[in-house]
Image: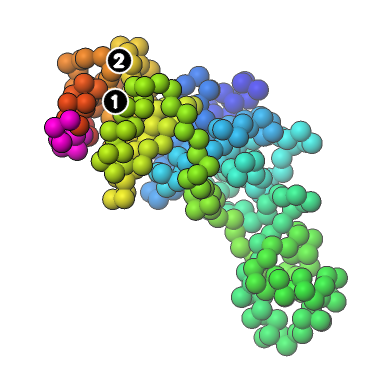
Amino acid sequence: MEDFRKFLLKELTVQLRDHGFVFTEPDMDGIASFDLAAKRDDDKFIIKIVYNIDTIREENAIEMNYISKLIGCIALVIGKRASNGDLESNIVYYRHEIPIMTYDTFIDYMDGSRPYIYSAHGGYYVSIKGDSLRSLREKKRYSIGYVSGSIGVSRRSISLYETGTAATLDVYMKLQRLFSDDIKKTIDLLSGIRTTQANRFPENLQNDFFESIFSMMRSLGFEMFPFRKTPFDAMASDNAADRIMLGLAEQLGSYRKAKAIANLSKLFEKDSLVVSKEKTDKSSIQGCPVVNYSDMVEANRNGSLDMLLRKKTDSR
């Protein structure tokens, strides 16, 4: 529901400001894959707000995961309910590998309270610190058989928990009562960055203009990632960890994304660049450097494209 998204977005910006975050909204009328980007020291987020988490589209989730991977930020969704009822606080849900939580849970997260319960097929689960569990069992001189009998699971299950396998919430609570010590792992919201696979990323370029730019950037060693519902049209990434947020403007005068690209690149400390298909004398637009497509083509022809791009991205 759009009213819910707008209301919660307003509330969230107040909380982010109060918690010392700087943030920016992409200002794409709610159609972007995320609604807000925020940073506080090493904490970096891109956040999408939805009322019903079952409405999250896979292509949007894939884009959020790739932005997370390229920028090194946490991609998450704040939601209210799923088709079977309201979401519960202090629990992390997932849709298409994107972590989801309630607004209150995210506020607690900003206050330093890390969630450890997650929802998966069949119920709620807690990841176990296997080494800690084994150490506690041996310290108390409990056999695997004694522990399994005390909490009502198989001996094999106890062995699996001691290797770090997750337990159901009910089993975790029984283990906690038996050992009276911390054996839980908090949820790593950055795990999506490490698991996102490049071969899952779709590349359906919009036209020959986009394809030509991608080809030239690849000739310099950049890996290229196109996006459809983000404030930027693509990201260029190379082995030196350089990241360039690209805007590809066929008509510079009506290009809406430049300000958002400039703000996001500043927030996440990445380079930005708008490529203008039409010839222009502008060196920047809305704080974002501009390069003429024709100049890129000529520089690529004479071997000076890398120099041109560095000059442009350094001029901000």
- 156 over 249 or under it: above or below: below
Indicate the position of residue 20 as horizontal and vertical percent values. Answer: 42, 42
- 75 over 167 or under it: above or below: above
Mark 1 / mark 2, whichever is N-terminal = 2
Q: In the drawing, what numbered circle is on residue 274?
A: 1
Q: Is residue 103 magenta?
A: no
Quarter of the image for residue 96 reads top right
- 210 over 269 or under it: above or below: above
Can you say which quadrant of the picture contains the C terminus?
A: top left
Q: Nearer the viewer, residue 253 or 83?
A: 253
78 sits to left or right of 267: right
Q: In the drawing, what numbered circle is on residue 220?
A: none
Q: Nearer the viewer, residue 143 or 88?
A: 143
Determine the secondary structure under disc 2: helix
Residue at 61% x, 21% y is 2
In the rendered structure, which segment of residues is drawn in magenta? 301-309
Mark 1 packing: few (<14 Cα in 10 Å), some, or many (20+)? many
255 sits to left or right of 50: left
Coloring basis for residues: rainbow
Quarter of the image for residue 245 reads top left
- 33 over 285 or under it: above or below: below
Q: Check disc 1 and give the amino acid type.
A: Val
Mark 2 packing: few (<14 Cα in 10 Å), some, or many (20+)? some
Q: Check disc 2 and give the amino acid type.
A: Leu
- Asked if the residues shown at circle 1 and circle 2 are in contact, with their CB atoms under 8 angstroms apart, the answer is yes
Q: Nearer the viewer, residue 269 or 306?
A: 306
Report the residue marked by disc 2: 252
Determine the secondary structure under disc 1: strand
